[in-house]
């Protein structure tokens, strides 16, 4: 594990983040947007761990644990909101939620 | 060790491209699990084996399964897949893709011509992570606990469905 350049890890994190970003921007389905946000969070966590491994400090992995926790809480609340949206609007189209209060 | 890193990262990139281009949402989630597994392998190579296990357990094992459960609860029919095929046309890909590729180009330029010294990854022990979590970062652990609890309570309240009772002339909403 000693010959892999540091830039390769960060480049991988950047490419994954960019793919998640593109997916958030082009999708209309709400669940696909949630999945894309998860991809972006995972890429950010990868960048943290690469940085922590480069300086041999535990802070990168600590940050990844916090990111993991936050992603889990966000997914549960986001899915509950998606259930409510589907119950009200009968569709998963994010453009359908364009009126306030009915 | 270098070859394994490049193979795992290319699998991660290919799997993520497949995630963002699928019409069927379950297919996209399966490719997402593959992507998370590849990234877990990258974590292991970099020297964070505990994080690799944690990623598999929590990300691929809990979050993706939670999304699959909710999708099954929604009871989507075949016409939703068809609708997704109509929504995801080639035309809308151009704008965000161009902007994002420009951003990525900037990032790659900075990363490759910058002064990132050192070319070795050192393994960080899980014990060091634990000492750090219970030492300087104990506030973060407490706040994560509070966040998770508020997430649970919020998800419970938001996920409740109210039954509508139609009582002849009036519509009553009963919880």
Image (cartoon, rainbow, N blue to C red):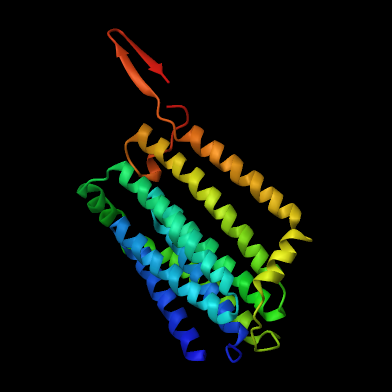
Whole-percent x and y of residue B12? 43, 74
Left/right of residue B32 with respect to residue A2 in the rendered view:
left
* Residue B104 visible to an observer of this rendering: no
Quadrant into which the C terminus of chain B falls: top left
Q: Residue at x 49, y 46 (%)?
A: A76
Number of numbered discs overlaid on the protein picture: 0
Check the image and report above or below for B125 versus A99.
below
Check the image and report above or below for A102 versus B74.
above
* Residue A2 visible to an observer of this rendering: yes
Left/right of residue B115 with respect to residue A40 in the rendered view:
right
Check the image and report above or below for B78 versus A61.
above
The image quadrant that residue B19 belongs to is bottom left
The image quadrant that residue A96 belongs to is top left
Check the image and report above or below for A19 versus B44.
above
Q: Residue at x 65, y 50 (%)?
A: B144
Taking depth in this image into account, of B137 and B119 the one nearest to the observer is B137
Farthest residue toward the left?
B78
Whole-percent x and y of residue B111? 62, 81
Taking depth in this image into account, of A76 and A91 the one nearest to the observer is A76
Farthest residue toward the right?
B136
Q: Residue at x 42, y 70 (%)?
A: B35
Whole-percent x and y of residue B31? 36, 66
Farthest residue toward the front?
B127
Taking depth in this image into account, of B54 and B115 the one nearest to the observer is B54
Q: Residue at x 54, y 41 (%)?
A: B152
Whole-percent x and y of residue B43? 55, 75
């Amino acid at each position: 594990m000693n010959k892999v350049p540091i830039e390769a890890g960060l480049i991988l994190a950047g490419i994954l983040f960019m793919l998640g970003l593109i997916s958030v921007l082009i999708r209309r389905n709400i669940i696909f947007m949630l999945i894309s946000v998860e991809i972006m969070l995972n890429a950010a966590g990868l960048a943290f761990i690469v940085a922590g491994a480069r300086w041999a400090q535990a802070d990168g992995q600590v940050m990844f644990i916090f990111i993991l926790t936050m992603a889990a809480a966000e997914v549960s609340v986001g899915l509950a909101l998606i259930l409510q949206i589907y119950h009200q609007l009968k569709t998963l189209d994010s453009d359908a939620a364009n009126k306030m209060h009915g | 060790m270098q070859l394994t890193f490049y193979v795992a990262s290319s699998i991660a990139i290919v799997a993520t491209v497949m995630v963002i281009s699928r019409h069927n949402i379950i297919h996209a989630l399966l490719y997402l699990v593959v992507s998370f597994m590849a990234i877990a392998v990258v974590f292991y190579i970099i020297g964070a084996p505990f994080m690799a296990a944690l990623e598999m357990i929590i990300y691929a094992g809990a979050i993706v399964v939670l999304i699959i459960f909710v999708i099954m609860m929604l009871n989507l029919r075949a016409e939703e897949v068809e609708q997704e095929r109509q929504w995801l046309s080639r035309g809308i890909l151009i704008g965000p893709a161009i902007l994002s590729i420009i951003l990525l180009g900037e990032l790659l330029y900075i990363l490759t011509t910058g002064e990132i010294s050192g070319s070795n990854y050192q393994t960080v022990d899980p014990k060091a992570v634990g000492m750090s979590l219970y030492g300087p970062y104990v506030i973060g652990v407490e706040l994560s606990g509070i966040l998770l609890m508020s997430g649970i309570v919020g998800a419970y309240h938001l996920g409740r469905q109210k039954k509508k009772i139609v009582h002849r002339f009036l519509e009553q909403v009963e919880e």
